[in-house]
Image: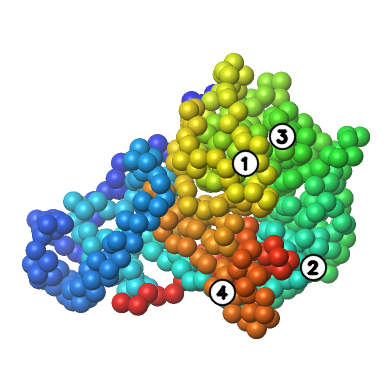
Amino acid sequence: MTSNDSNDSDISDNTNDFPEEQAAGIPEEYNISDNSNESNTDILLMESNPRLGFYLRRTTHKEKSANNKNSSNSYLSNYDNEVDVDGMNKGEILLKSGEFGIIEPSPDKGLNAEKFFSKHACHQLMLREILPGRFSKVSFGKNFKPNTNGKVMINYGVRAYSGQYSQDGSFFYTCCQDFRVHIYDTTNPDVFKETKTITGDCGRWTITDANLSLDNQWLAYTSITPIVYLAKTDPNDEYQIPLDFSKQLSEDFGLWSIRFSNDAKELIGGANDGKIYVYDIEAQNVLLQLYGHNDDVNSVCFADDSSHILFSGSDDAYIKVWDRRSMRGGKESGVLVGHTEGITYVAAKGDGRYCLSNSKDQTMKLWDIRMMISGERFDKIQLEDYRLEWDYRWNHYPGDRNFKHPQDVSVMTYRGHSVLKTLIRCHFSPSSTTGQRFLYTGSEDGRVRIFSLDGRIVQTLNVVEALQDEYILFRRNRFQQESVTRDASWHPYLPIMISTSWSDTAFSGVIVQHSYKEPDY
């Protein structure tokens, strides 16, 4: 597979705007533009749809004053994010491409949604009923991002390292340093009811990764050992199946990351020997060993539901793309070059094309595999190693955070968070409610940052501010000094996010729920 090849799951390249719609029953001969007189616009809307016209006239003035109040903050977030002009244009192009949710109506096509539509939840619900063609779930849901510092749902006496919702949002699971996996029923999103605790064998340091099968029946976890354990999510079934990936390899061999295939018949694993392993669960043996990296493989994932394309991210600073349908001699199809330090996490968009990564160079990057360097070309060119001699667990990053790799093929670079002390994770926002037009990441400073595709930080969630109960207040100062938000998970259908954090000094973990709250108008 070359960088120009397509794959089975490629989505349409058509970037044309959606067909024009007559908003609110406004006749075609009326032309409402950004320069229209607002009073004339109100009259016109009243004539064409009295109920909507009255509503918009009442809310537009509130929106105008609120926008004036927030305009300076929006500018600062762009400036602080240090995204260059070329990068910003690429992000804006993506927002208008149709590959990240619906294309928003342009200002010259009838009613200007950004100007006239209030983002208040009850107003949006009313407009969805009045204008069903204009308000899809994505168009509606993208306005409601988690925006509160949140409330503490669970407090552990040990560090919590990862936490994720199931794909249907029905339960949530966390992994802790005491080698336990906790599973919670979240059918009521405001109540975490623990249904099962999986106790694993003591591995090395912590459970580094866990993954849930698509049918919610099985959970696999690893802790930098050759053994991956499979456990049933059924609270009445305590049996665990050990899967040995080692096959007489070194005793130091261990897996950092694991993922189920879509049909739950295979697992892929990233190991500390620089290899990627594909494991047949039923046969209980290794199908493939891919010799891909020169350092630890910290993260692996499938690119889409077909399970043909794999992504792997390593401490050698490269993300490699593997296509199992066309691997010749176990070679990668291509390499995504651009990070200058080790990769801590890789997340797939799920369309077989885009992926997201976090790195110890203190950046998050968005990638399109059509821009990758082919495996053959990568072997022929001499790329300089820009990694510095430092330990991200104990030191501040000594490099230039604005340095750009000369062969960078990423689509966008995002700055503003801190990737220190642990393998901090990043994700795409849900497709069903946001069209995946937002990206979010944990941070060493105890915050979750939500980015727009164009590079703006559109929301910051401060975990420390959520620590209000008496038990945590007792140690609040210590937690605040050393808090690390390692993972976060956005509910697939609700404007709720769960962050997973731990304190370096207090040796405690905390699960915080961040919800959406209506702004004061």
Q: On the image, numbered disc 4 is attached to which residue?
A: 466
- Mark 1 vs mark 2, CA separation in Å: 30 Å
How far apart are labels 1 and 4 at the CA level?
Answer: 29 Å
Type of residue at label 1? Answer: Ile
When asked about the image quadrant of residue 71, the answer is bottom left
The residue at which mark 3 appears reads as: 295
Q: Residue at x 37, y 59 (%)?
A: 139
**Residue type, label 3:** Asp
Please give left or right for residue 387 compared with residue 293 in the image: left
Q: Secondary structure at mark 3?
A: loop
Tags 1 and 4 in contact by the CB under 8 Å rule?
Answer: no
Q: Which numbered disc covers residue 343?
A: 1
Within 10 Å of disc 2 (Cα), the crowding (few <14, some 14-19, many 20+) is some
Q: Quadrant location of the N terminus?
A: top right
- Residue on which the image places disc 2: 197
The earlier-in-sequence mark between 1 and 4 is 1
Q: Disc 3 to disc 4, how far (Cα)?
A: 37 Å
User: Callout 4: few (<14), some (14-19), or many (20+) C-alpha neighbours within 10 Å?
Assistant: some
Query: What kind of element bears circle 4?
Result: helix
Q: Point out the residue furthest to the bottom here.
A: 470
Q: Is residue 146 left or right of residue 25?
A: right
